[in-house]
Image: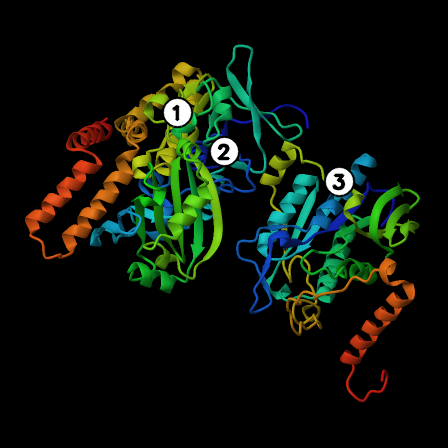
Amino acid sequence: MTGRLTFDAIVVGAGPAGVAAALTMARGGLNVIIIERGRFAGAKNLFGGVFYTHALADVLPDYWERKPPFERPVTEQGYWMLSPDSVIRVMHKSERYQKEPADAYTVLRARFDPWFAEQAVAAGALLITRTTVTQLLKDERGRVIGVDTDRPEGKVYAPVVIIAEGVNNLLTQQAGLIASDLPPKYVALAVKQYINLPAKELQARFGLSGPREGVAIDVFGDATLGLPGTGFIYTDQSGISIGVGMLLDEFVTHRLRPYEVLERFKNHPVVRPYLEGGEVREYGAHLIPEMGYDRMPKLAGDGVMVAGDAAGMVDALHREGTNLAITAGKIAGETALAAHQAGDFSAAFLSRYRQSLEGTFVLQDMKQYRRMTDFLESSPQFMGTYVNLLNEAALRYFTAHGIPKRTMEHEILKMVRERRSFTGVAWDMLKLMRAMRG
Amino acid sequence: MNGDNPMHAVVAIKQVPDTSNVRIDPETGTLIREGVPAIVNPYDIHAVEAAVQLKERLGGGKVTVITMGPPKAAEALLECVEQGADRAILITDRKFGGADTLATSYVLARAIEVINAELPVDIIFFGKQAIDGDTAQVGPGVATRLNIPLITYAVAIEEFDLAARRAVVHRRVEQGIEVLETTLPVLLTVEKEIAPVRHAPLPRLIAAARYKPEVWTATAPVPFDPQQIGLKGSPTVVGKAYTPSPRSGGEVISVAALGLDAVVARAMAVIEQAHVRNLQPGTGVVS
């Protein structure tokens, strides 16, 4: 083969960010190559399971006709506050969730990601799998002009490279967009199992009327031994996605093994009955970048942009990520199209990507919750103490002991004082409010 | 088939479930295929590599890959194009479904005849067997139908002389290696040693991503004999499939401790007992 392999744009990674970027550029008439290291798009990907459709509708308005492999619409969602032997459930179910397409679906990435990638291929993008990008190629002035891969004759050139490499942001570092590896206090580790159950049985257990209903539950408290983090239980078509996520730091500090935390959660007396008789069909673990707004990489350099997990685009509080990634990928793609039109791939021109993104929920939400990770880290008692307290209070409230109600109220207040003190509670609430309001 | 053209190799491949992590349904005795990735049969990918390396060694030629299977098998063909195949043909039709090795060898042989009529074929490669069926019958069946020499368990092509229409091929046998001289065209079923699979270069991956395999059905462009394909053309009937229970026990008898005679006597006693158990009463063979 003679001459250079040259494309209009290179996308590294066939996850939601990369595919959205490639789809946008291919539809705009660019000759695009997506390079993915897994056996197929999504082979390396994992998430809890709730996918929000608004971002998808933005890049692929007719997505519903293209039959996306969704599991179940989320028609009931909320929180469980789990103490070692009790639970308070705050669930929201509404007729208004019952529409098609719904706002949110449970999704298995091994099914969804290949479908999404197919849409980019149908639009004309070239998808190359089983190939790892090993480094960025730069010209003498340091501008990114292509990538090298682990294949023989593996260099590919393009005036713009969109890095959507995921949480292991080696290329983002190489591009000089972020200084170093993410510190373990800003990375969460989630472990998850997919447990197979017949649809009928699943529906009976979760009170669902049919395949067009589904539940998404985030679990606080004992799911993560009271440490900052969450557990989750999502219903799939004929199975349950169950998992726990905690900051890497917590696993290290408390010497916890991720699968042990998950096993413990699965065996909680409140959780176990839902899983009874199910067969574990899939298990996996994945890192989640939770560095927040202030520690995000620069989003563009000369000839290069970064999107998705690689750029830390995660809203951990609302379990959002794939929608941020898709929206960011789309805007990166649009920026690349504009750059081609202008013939300008400089960092200055590509900084439009960030400017556009500032106008969307992606950066606005990230900015608002910029203190969330720090808040949880600085208030490790938050989850455990309050969740247990609420359960204790509920137990007293709901049982009759033949004592005056006034006495019961005093007991509850005394409990609060003993466990955290009123000033402590006030302080926590103030910090929480600050973290929420940004 | 003559020596005026550049070398033309045909490789027949099969897409199989990756049985390295396959499970058997304990109730039905069949493979659980759900969630099991499909791959090119491991021996077949070496067959493709052998054909491509032969082409490189001769300084040119053409490698055609064929498979019979469901539409999904196109993926397997594309992997062969990545490895260097020039042309890929997917023979697919519901009418081919349920084929045993006899029907499969008919379809492949007929396809190769047609390919040969377009561009004479000098060598045909098969993997030594497929890891899902393990019969090792289809390659030999095709050679028989085409009435050409067959060399099974090939491990090396020592010489390949297109002009003189001869080749020298090494073949694995239990005692070692047999070195055989053959005329061309020849059909080889190959061991993995025939050629190590190389990491395909990026330009080949790009070519494969853009490549669309040709699709042949039961009727077009080649009409296959409806009596010889699919279930109709397959006399094999699977009576029962089951997972054998693991062998039990066994006994270690030490020659050093008991002495040779005692050990032999003990072993004979065990064998005799096993035979008596296996025979119908009253057959009188062992009493």
- Display colour scheme: rainbow
Report whether residue B160 is seen: yes
Give the mark, 2 or 1, whose residue is nearer the N terminus: 2
The numbered mark at residue A13 is 2
Q: CA distance from mark 2 to mark 1?
A: 18 Å
Tag 1 subunit: A
Please determine whether, in this image, residue B81 is positioned above or below residue B140: above
User: From this viewpoint, which residue is outermost toward the bottom?
Assistant: B282
Badge 2: chain ID = A
Q: Is residue B283 above or below residue B71?
A: below
Q: Is residue B164 left or right of residue B75?
A: right
Residue at 37% across, 56% down: A272
Q: Is disc 3 on the same chain as disc 2?
A: no
Residue that carries the numbered disc 1 in the rendered image:
A335
Give the secondary structure at mark 2.
Answer: loop
Tell me if residue A62 can be seen.
no
Q: Gap in Å between the C-alphas at discs 2 and 3?
A: 29 Å
Residue situated furthest front in the rendering: B257
Query: Residue B196 shows which numbered tag?
Result: 3
Q: Which mark is residue A139?
A: none
Q: Is label 3 in a helix, a strand or a loop?
A: loop
Q: Position of residue A419 (x, y in %)?
A: 22, 37
Q: Amino acid at mark 1?
A: Thr
Q: How would you rate the neighbour count of disc 1 (Cα within 10 Å): few for under 14, some for 14-19, many for 20 or more?
A: many
Q: Are the numbered discs 3 and 1 placed on the same chain, yes or no?
A: no
Q: Position of residue A342 (x, y in %)?
A: 41, 18
Crowding at dot 3, Cα within 10 Å, few <14 / some 14-19 / many 20+, comes out as few
**Disc 1 on helix, strand or loop?**
helix
Q: Residue A344, located in which quarter of the rendered image?
A: top left
